Amino acid sequence: MRIVILLLALVCAFGAAALWQQGRVADHKERQNEARRIAAGQAAKTEVGVMPDGWGVVLVGKPAGDEPAVEPRADSSGPITEPGPGAPTPPTPRPRADPAEPADFELVVQPGASLSKLAAAHYGTSKKELVDALAHYNGLSSADALQAGQKLRLPSPAKLQAFAQSR
C-alpha cells in the first residue's frame, strides 16, 4: 500500500513539473515572437509595454512652452553688459494670457430627467441656488420648465457662479 501511495505521489509531482515546464515554454515562445515582431518593425517596445504597429502612446503632463524662453545676451567680446544711454531698450515680456474658459457641456434632455438630477450628476450637488442659476443660464423660466428633447448647456462651476452673481 505504501508503494502505491509513493507511486501516486511521484506521478503527481511529475505531472506538476510537466505543467510548470509547459507554461515556461509557452512564455518563452511568446517573448521570442514579441522580439521578432519588434525586430521586424511590426511592434515597438514602450514604457507601458509592447505596442502594435500603428498604435501610439500619449504622454499627459505639463504643456510644451509653459516656461518663458530665456535667451542669453552675451557679446562675443565678453560678459553681459547693461545698455548705455540712448541704446534701444529690450522688448518687455508680454503677460501670459489666462487660459480660455472651457466650453459649456451640452446635452439633450432625456425623458424622466430633471434639472436637479442633472445638476447632482454634473456638479455633485443639487442645491436650489445652483438649480435656479442653471435654469436661468439656459433661459428657462423655472427649473420645472425643462422638457425632454431640449438642449441644455452645463457651464463650468466658476462660469455658472459668475453668471449667478451678475444677475
Image (spheres, rainbow, N blue to C red):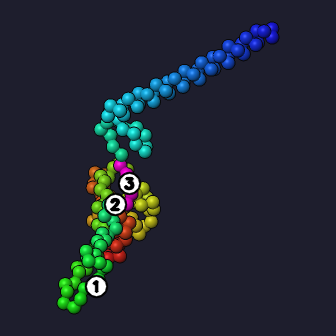
Q: In the image, what residue type sits under mark 1?
A: Glu
Q: Which class describes the residues within 10 Å of circle 1: few (<14), some (14-19), or many (20+)?
A: few
Q: Pick the quarter of the image with the N terminus.
A: top right
Q: Which residue is mark 3?
A: 60
Front residue of 24/96: it is 24
Residue type highlighted by circle 3: Val
Q: Earlier in the sequence, mark 1 or mark 3?
A: 3
Q: CA distance from mark 1 to mark 3?
A: 41 Å
- Along the polypeptide, which appears first: circle 2 or circle 1? 2
Tell me the SS state at disc 1: loop
Query: Given the current orientation, which residue lies at the most extreme front position?
Result: 77
Q: Is residue 152 magenta?
A: no
In which quarter of the view is residue 129 placed?
bottom left
* On screen, residue 146 above or below 164: above
Circles 2 and 1, Cβ within 8 Å, touching? The answer is no
Q: Residue furthest bottom?
A: 85
Kindly indicate the quadrant of the structure image that contains residue 141.
Answer: bottom left
Residue where numbered disc 1 is placed: 82
Mark 2 vs mark 1, foreground winner is 1
Name the foreground residue: 112 vs 6.
6
Residue 154 location (% of width, % of height): 33, 60
Location of residue 38 (image quadrant):
top left
For disc 3, the neighbor class at 10 Å (few under 14, some 14 to 19, many from 20) is few
Nearest to the observer: residue 23 or residue 103: 23
Separation of disc 3 and disc 2 at Cα? 8 Å
Secondary structure type for disc 2: loop
Find residue 63 and name its label.
2
Q: Between marks 2 and 1, how big is the CA–CA gap?
A: 33 Å
State whether the magenta stretch is mostly helix, strand or loop.
loop
